Image (cartoon, rainbow, N blue to C red):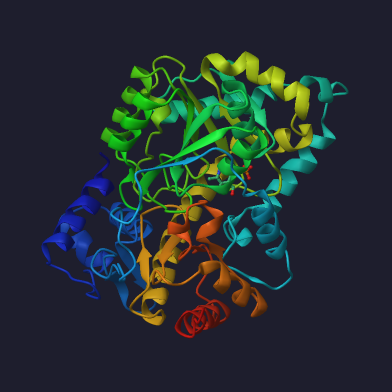
Amino acid sequence: MAKYEQLAQELKTRIAQGVWQAGDKLPSLRQTVADSGLSLMTVLNAYQLLESQGVISAQAKSGYLVTPKPELIARQGEAFRYPERQKPIYLSDSVDINEFVFNVLQASKQADIVPFGSGFPDPSLFPQQALARSLVKVTRHMSPSFAADNLPPGNAGLRKAISQRYAKLGMSISPDEIIITSGAMEALNLSLATLTQAGDWVVIESPTFYGAMQAIERLKLKAIAVATDPQQGIDLEALAEVLKTYPVKACWLMSQHQNPLGCSLSDTKKQALYQLLSEHKVSLIEDDVYQELYVDSSAPRPVKAFDTEGRVLHCGSFSKSLIAGYRVGWVAAGCHAPQLQRLQVMSTLSTSAPMQLAIADFIQSAQYERHLKQLRKKLASRKLAMYQLLCAHLPESVGVNFAQGGYFLWLALPSHMDATQIYYQAIERGISIAPGNLFSNQVEFRHFMRLNASYECSPEIISAVVVLAELIRNYSR
Ligand SMILES: Cc1ncc(COP(=O)(O)O)c(C=O)c1O
């Protein structure tokens, strides 16, 4: 552990012991330098680390203040009873979600909408200009054979750069098992198509990212949704029961910063999940598009890190951490890589070559790490600020689930409410939200909604929260 991490840990322990409490001012940088004998740089790094973790926040003219701990101000609301209200397992012979997802995505394209329903982070957090420079540079120097060079499995430089990022996590993933795709969506769809045939059973989380349900619908598969707790993640006991009872062909889930809940599995749980799947010889499609958006000083490792058999198809993307519209993602497909490439050639043929080259250029430079550090810090403080804003304005009966990392907050309205109705009313007032029905076809999630917390709490965002609170207060069936 570096010195600044040690100091951050000590300060955190003291905050946990109540030496400094929510709203208290931490000793100034100068004071801590004098007390600890460490350099100003070390102390500054420690404070910035705590800030990026949402433990303290920098206030103009006041120094660093201890932020209220989410657990202390957690609002569970009368309707936020997990997991008792939820069935551990929910079977669907056929999934029908695409039409609703399509309509919600179309509505979110309206100009000037307040994008609480958006799945992407605030685009102003992306280094668009620097990427444009990379794009110009690489297209100027493209070889005449660039189209053929970047056919599946994709650009060699980009695959190597991605495998080096895995190496930073202590994982050995050869560039040969990585396939570049048009966003994670293609990676996930190809993975599912590789593992299944129409009519097969697939395990998903409940609630889950709607893309999983769309893919299941398109491939005419059957879904088994397993209860997923907003803090602890998937219920492994229920999953074990499912694996004993049904001939499951694949499991599709998110182990980190789950969409829509925001929760992440502990390392112990990731390992137990892997062992369980391995015992039943079931492959895992690990959707890890928010992997880079963690708050701790070190990056969490995915379930793929425990994979000794090539059983995990790990899907990643640059859409959430670098740039949304370039549509570049990947899958580390283990032993399934050859089959997956063949399916890709039959569907999209390949990912846009200039986009692959531009991203390869950018992520191989020092700019990428700098950008990620800034992004994590901003997202952590914006999420906390949005959480506090919601707690201040929403009626007491609304629960707000806060999980570290990513940028989603999951809200539970009182159980008689239908978030889809609020969605339509909010759209009329120029605000989008993501209603619970997008993430499950169970009625249990009708009164939930996901909000995007990646935007700065500007006057416009504050007014939108006030309107949302008013719609909830005035709700009538
Ligand atoms: C959980 C999850 N997986 C996959 C995707 C798709 O990512 P991409 O834009 O890279 O296709 C999204 C996008 O919203 C997502 O939230």
Percent across and percent down for residue 154 are 70, 24
Vertical side of 443 occupied by 241: above or below:
above
At 21% from the left and 62% from the top, the residue drawn is 32
Q: Nearer the viewer, residue 37 or 72?
A: 72
Q: Position of residue 318 (x, y in %)?
A: 60, 42
Can you tell which quarter of the image residue 364 is in?
A: top right
Q: In the depicted view, which residue is nearer to us: 100 or 354?
A: 100
Residue sitting at x 24%, y 74%:
25
Specify the farthest residue to the right: 144
Report the residue that reaches farthest toward the front: 93
Whether residue 105 is situated above or below residue 197 in the rendered picture: below
Can residue 310 be seen here? The reply is yes
* Front residue of this view, candidates 380 and 365: 380
Return the x and y of residue 93 as percentages of the image width and height: 55, 37
Is residue 161 in sight in this rendering?
no
Image check: 448 left or right of 183? left
Left or right, 150 with respect to 301, comes to: right
Question: Residue at (42%, 59%) from the top-left corner?
Answer: 380
Which quarter of the rendered image does ligand 1 occupy?
A: top right
